[in-house]
Amino acid sequence: MQRVVQVALDGVSLGGLYALVTLGIALVFGVMRLINFAHGQLIMAGAYTAFLLNGRPDALVVVATLLVVTGLALLIERVAYRPIRTASPTTLLVTSFALSYLLQNVAVLIFGLPKSVTILPALEQPVTIGGIRTSGLDLAVIGSTVILLIGLSAFLNNTRLGVQMRAAAEDFQMARLVGVHANRVIASAFGISGAFAAVVAILLVVQVGVVTPTFGVQPVLIGFVATVVGGMGSLYGAVIGGFSLGIVSAVLQGILPYTVVPFRDAVLFGLVILTLLIRPQGLLPSAALKERV
């Protein structure tokens, strides 16, 4: 029983981290129909911010990382995406890739070799609850995910700007016709996406302890897969997709034979392909996607 609970905790923790990445991607896709692959470089920027402030008070590191990454996300929207917002989806996608590689190579030029970072060391300590041994980091990931999901849900459902973002995600052109301010809605989506990227960066830095120019590549690829599995354009689907990938990954880690564990990701993505063959629109597609289909 303890083993089952341990695997469940690991799965929820990993799924929560994936869900935060996926939500950051899904927020921007919802209002712009753009897969922002530069989201991975926002996570990288947060990690390097933590490196530059390494040794300073943890509260300062966390706040500075949130401000820097959110500001960078807003700058990217204003400089890179706003001028070509009405361009074809292909142009937007190419711009996304180009921006991702640009930021990654800037990091290579500035920082070079991998850098060691130590922040929030208390989260690395083991915690025992009811005979179940886990880490403070797992609890921090779960707690952060719950708080951010509740906060985002409250924002989207109880504020004027949140309702406008939901309307834009369903039908952007119609939302503009009824008075939704496009620049404000899109900038808000990028800002919230940046804040989520900053939280992911902090949690990953605590977990890994090393920052490289490719720090955000794997998370954003997993986030993209989870977005597709959950249903493109659906925020609830993004959460379900992220948690599904995390939980299935943890379960596979626990049940696969020792000799097969190195191929866990191959098994996981094989299950993803099978899921999409059965339900190509994703587990919970948005209403807008259903109409287009």
Image: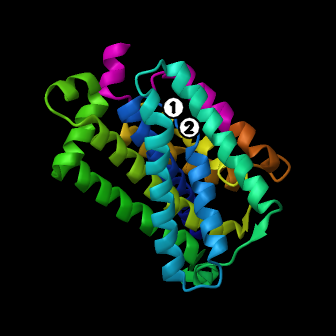
Q: CA distance from mark 2 to mark 1?
A: 6 Å
| Residue sitting at the far top | 293
Would residue 173 be found to the left or right of residue 226 on screen?
left
Residue at x 80%, y 63% (from the top left corner):
114
Q: Which residues are magenta?
A: 268-293
Report whether 16 appears left or right of 235. right
Asked which secondary structure carries label 2, the reply is: helix
Q: Is residue 60 above or below residue 163?
A: below
Q: Which residue position holds label 1? A: 228
**Residue 31 in the image, given as x and y percentages of width and height:** 35, 34
Label 1 residue SS: helix
> As shown in the figure, which amino acid type bears the numbered disc 2?
Phe
Q: Which quadrant is the C terminus positioned in?
A: top left
* Residue 226 makes an appearance in the image: yes
Q: Is residue 107 left or right of residue 87?
A: right
Residue lying at the far right of the rendered structure: 259
Q: Crowding near pointer 1: few (<14 within 10 Å), some, many (20+)?
A: many
Residue shown at the point (19%, 35%) measured from the top left: 180
Q: What residue appears at the point 43 percent right and 66 percent down from the top-left corner?
A: 144
Q: Can residue 233 be seen?
A: no
Q: Nearer the viewer, residue 71 or 25?
A: 71
Main secondary structure along the magenta-highlighted residues? helix
Mark 1 is on which residue type? Val
Q: Nearer the viewer, residue 21 or 181?
A: 181
Task: List x then y, in percent, for residue 34.
Answer: 47, 31
The quadrant in which residue 220 appears is top right
User: In this picture, is 247 found above or below 4?
Assistant: above
**Where is residue 197 drawn, in percent x and y?**
51, 55
In the rendered image, which residue does mark 2 sit on? 224
Query: Residue 178 falls in which quadrant of the image?
Result: top left
Q: Mark 2 packing: few (<14 Cα in 10 Å), some, or many (20+)?
A: many
User: Is there a contact, CB below 8 Å, between mark 2 and mark 1?
Assistant: yes
